[in-house]
Image (cartoon, helix red, strand yellow):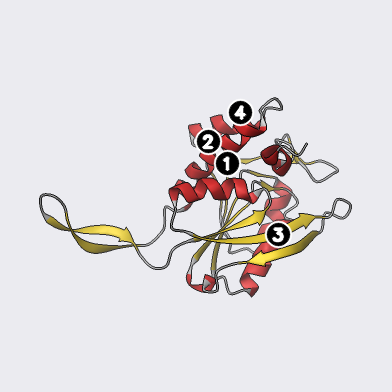
C-alpha cells in the first residue's frame, strides 16, 4: 500500500493555520492556497526523473541536469481543485492540465461526474490529482478510477487536508496511489465535512458563502 506523506514544513503549517481561521477573507484564502500549493508541488515532485544535456555557461561547457520525459499533468477536481492548480502551475508552468468535474450529492455523499477532459497521452505522463479536501474520499476514488480508465499509469493524490476516513477509502480502492497532504485532521462530521477542517474549500475560495 502506498504511503501517506504529511508535508509538515513550517511555512505550510503556518499558512494552513491562517486558512483555517473563520475570519480569513476569500482573497486571502486564495492567496494562501496558491502559496501552499507551490510548496506542496516542491515536495511532491522530488522524484521526477532527470537526465543530463550539454550546455554552455558563460565560462565553460558542462553536462547539466534537466527534467526527463514528458511533462507532468496536473488534474484538478473541480471546482476547489482550481486553487491548488493555479499555485502548482506557477512552479511547473509547462505542465499539462486536466479537469474532472465532480460534485458530491448532499444527501448520499456519492460523487457525480459532470465533466472530464485530460491530455490524450496521459498514460505517458506522471499525473498529480489535486483537490483541497480529502473528506469521504468518494470524489477522489471516482476521479482516480476515471483517470485509470483513460489510461493514467502513475498517479499521486495531493490535498490540503485529509480525514482518516477519506485516506482509508482511497487506500482501499487505489492502494498504489500515494497521498500527499498538509495535515490529517480528526474525523468527519455527520455531513461529511472534515473536523476541525476549514469549512467548504470551494465556497471559501470563490466567496460563494
| Quadrant showing the C terminus | top right
Instruction: Estimate the spatial distance between the alpha carbons at disc 2 and disc 4, rounded to whole Å.
Output: 10 Å
Determine contact: label 1, label 3, CB under 8 Å.
no
Give me the residue at 66% from left, 27% from top.
24
Give me the residue at 52% from left, 73% from top.
123
Give me the residue at 82% from left, 58% from top.
110
- What element does badge 3 sit on? strand
- Please tell me which residue lies in front, 7 or 115: 115
- Tag 3 residue: 101
Q: Nearer the viewer, mark 4 or mark 3?
A: 3
**Image side of residue 47 versus residue 77, left or right:** left
Instruction: Estimate the spatial distance between the alpha carbons at disc 4 and disc 3, rounded to whole Å.
Output: 28 Å
- Tag 2 residue: 12
- Tag 4 residue: 18
Q: Residue 1, how many percent across, how many down? A: 59, 61
Q: Quadrant of residue 104?
A: bottom right
Amino acid at each position: 500500500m502506498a504511503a501517506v506523506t504529511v508535508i509538515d514544513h513550517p511555512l505550510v503549517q503556518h499558512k494552513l493555520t491562517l486558512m483555517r481561521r473563520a475570519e480569513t477573507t476569500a482573497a486571502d484564502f486564495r492567496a494562501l492556497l496558491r502559496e501552499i500549493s507551490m510548496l506542496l508541488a516542491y515536495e511532491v515532485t522530488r522524484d521526477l526523473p532527470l537526465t543530463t544535456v550539454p550546455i554552455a555557461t558563460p565560462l565553460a561547457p558542462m553536462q547539466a541536469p534537466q527534467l526527463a520525459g514528458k511533462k507532468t499533468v496536473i488534474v484538478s477536481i473541480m471546482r476547489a481543485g482550481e486553487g491548488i492548480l493555479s499555485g502548482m502551475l506557477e512552479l511547473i508552468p509547462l505542465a499539462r492540465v486536466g479537469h474532472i468535474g465532480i460534485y458530491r450529492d448532499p444527501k448520499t455523499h456519492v460523487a457525480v461526474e459532470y465533466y472530464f477532459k485530460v491530455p490524450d497521452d496521459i498514460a505517458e505522463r506522471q499525473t498529480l490529482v489535486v483537490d483541497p479536501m480529502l473528506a469521504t474520499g468518494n470524489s477522489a476514488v471516482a476521479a482516480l478510477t476515471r483517470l485509470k480508465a483513460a489510461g493514467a499509469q502513475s498517479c499521486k493524490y495531493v490535498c490540503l487536508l485529509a480525514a482518516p476516513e477519506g485516506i482509508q477509502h482511497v487506500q482501499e480502492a487505489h492502494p498504489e496511489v500515494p497521498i500527499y497532504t498538509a495535515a490529517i485532521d480528526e474525523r468527519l462530521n455527520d455531513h461529511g465535512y472534515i473536523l476541525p477542517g476549514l469549512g467548504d474549500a470551494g465556497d471559501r475560495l470563490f466567496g460563494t458563502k
